Image (cartoon, helix red, strand yellow):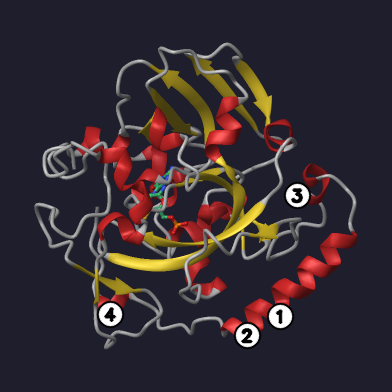
Amino acid sequence: MLIRRPADVRPSEITPPELYASRRRFLGGALALATASVAPALFADTGPAGASLNYRHNAELSSSEPPNSWQDVTSYNNYYEFGTDKADPAERAGRLKVQPWSVAIGGEAEQRGSVPLEDLLKPHALEERIYRLRCVEAWSMAVPWVGIPLGEALKRFKPTSRAKYVAFTTLKDPAQMPGQRWPVLDWPYTEGLRIDEAMHPLAILAVGLYGRVLPNQNGAPLRLVVPWKYGFKSIKAIVRIDFTEQMPATAWNRAAAGEYGFYANVNPSVDHPRWSQKTERRIGAGAFAPRQPTQLFNGYAQVAELYRGMDLRRDF
Ligand code: MTE
């Protein structure tokens, strides 16, 4: 992955928490009155900042850090299907057609087939969770995602006992995703989790951020968010989910196996071969702000039990 220098980072302010909290109270109040189911609300009145969503804030699973501003989160992106510059996705992803959208379910599950996004979401209540996003390039943000627990969504398809892993695939459509015309990665982008990781309550499928429908540059209409892993695990624009017996191939691992492991757990004591992971730069904090120490599992210590007995230096 390309490493950006501090000069590339646009200094932008962090949303004052009071303002965000009062906005959230307002939205919460307004939306409590709405009785419509989630799906219609999802796709209603999409404006420049996206339609408002019905959701409840999950304080228990949210980071106490102030979230980065809307501007930071939606203008400093990694989405190589739209270019390798941080500004490319915001400039180019707007034309991606995200509706209608369906997800193909395949592999080791009793229920397979194509599921319209609305149906995938319908049984679930949307939750907001402010998660730290730690990119493998050694920068971080905090993002107020809106989504559903991944494990809950997956259980519905009744994975068989042979389902040891879950594989995710991004849309492949070079006509809409101009970056796919170049062999930067072996398209489509793919990712995977072990089934117990996928079932962990912290893993979510996100459909929004800041209480609004996900902007295209952040992975609309459906992306994964696995907060204890490097950001490249959080695959965008998901069109396929397969339950597999074997560990699935993942895009960055295929591109450079010595640099990007399957597990990709945030770990300050396992450096990337070309740079240290001991500290991170907080986006939006300004070029002169001190770097922060990286936390094991990005601070989500509750996932440690998933890796008991494993050598995290070997399985990086
Ligand atoms: N998903 C796809 N399909 N293509 C990508 O290039 N980049 C990954 C991940 N998901 C990527 C992707 C990386 S490296 C990161 S850090 C996060 O998305 C960035 O998410 P954000 O742009 O919403 O901050």
Mark 2 sits on what residue? 18
Mark 4 vs mark 2, CA separation in Å: 30 Å
Q: Are marks 2 and 3 in contact (CB under 8 Å)?
A: no
Where's residue 32, x and y in %?
A: 84, 61
At x 26%, y 88%, the residue is 288
Above/below status of 69 relative to 63 = below
Mark 3 vs mark 4, CA separation in Å: 37 Å
- Of the residues tagged 4 and 1, which is closer to the observer? 1
Amino acid on which the number 3 mark rests in the picture: Leu
Classify the position of the C terminus by image quarter: top left
Mark 1 sits on what residue? 22
Amino acid on which the number 1 mark rests in the picture: Ser
Where's residue 87, x and y in %?
A: 43, 65
Mark 3 sits on what residue? 42
- Of the residues tagged 2 and 3, which is closer to the observer? 2
The residue most toward the bottom is 288
Residue 7: assigned label = 4
User: How many residues crowd mark 2 within 10 Å: few (<14), some (14–19), many (20+)?
Assistant: few
Where's residue 305, x and y in %?
A: 31, 42
Question: Viewed as shown, does residue 13 lie left or right of 134?
Answer: right
Amino acid on which the number 2 mark rests in the picture: Glu
Amino acid on which the number 4 mark rests in the picture: Ala
Q: Are marks 1 and 2 in contact (CB under 8 Å)?
A: yes
Mark 4 vs mark 1, CA separation in Å: 33 Å
Q: Earlier in the sequence, mark 3 or mark 1?
A: 1
Mark 1 vs mark 2, CA separation in Å: 6 Å
Question: Viewed as shown, does residue 3 lie left or right of 35?
Answer: left
Q: Could you tell me which secondary element the residue under label 3 belongs to?
A: helix
Q: Could you tell me which secondary element the residue under label 4 belongs to?
A: helix
Work out whether residue 1 can be spotted.
yes
Q: Could you tell me which secondary element the residue under label 1 belongs to?
A: helix
